[in-house]
Amino acid sequence: MVVASLRHERQVAMEAERAIEQLTVKQVVSWFMKDEKIRREQGVDVAFLDL
């Protein structure tokens, strides 16, 4: 992954209580989907990603 995604990877790893190297594709995709759901339901200020 590119350096720009390191912030996101760190957040996913922290929430999964794993090292970045141990993350699976499924965990990363699930995290992004969860964050998007939060954005839709609770608003952009609550979501992690600032799109």
Image (cartoon, rainbow, N blue to C red):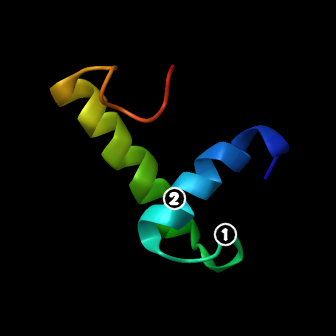
Name which residue lies at 16% across and 29% down.
Answer: 41
Q: Residues within 10 Å of mark 2 (few under 14, many from 20)?
A: many
Residue 12, numbered label = 2
User: Can you give x and y, in whole percent of width and height, for residue 8 in the image?
Assistant: 60, 46
Residue with the mark numbered 1: 20
User: Can you give x and y, in whole percent of width and height, for residue 45 in the image?
Assistant: 33, 20
Name which residue lies at 35% across and 32% down.
Answer: 47
Q: Amino acid at mark 1?
A: Ile
Secondary structure under tag 1 reads helix
Give 3 or 24, whichever is nearer the viewer. Answer: 3
Position of 27 relative to 44 (above/below):
below
Q: Is residue 47 left or right of residue 2?
A: left
How far is the residue under mark 1 from the one under mark 2?
8 Å
Q: Residues within 10 Å of mark 1 (few under 14, many from 20)?
A: some
Q: Quadrant of residue 25?
A: bottom right
Name which residue lies at 55% across and 65% down.
Answer: 13
Marks 1 & 2, CB-CB < 8 Å contact: yes
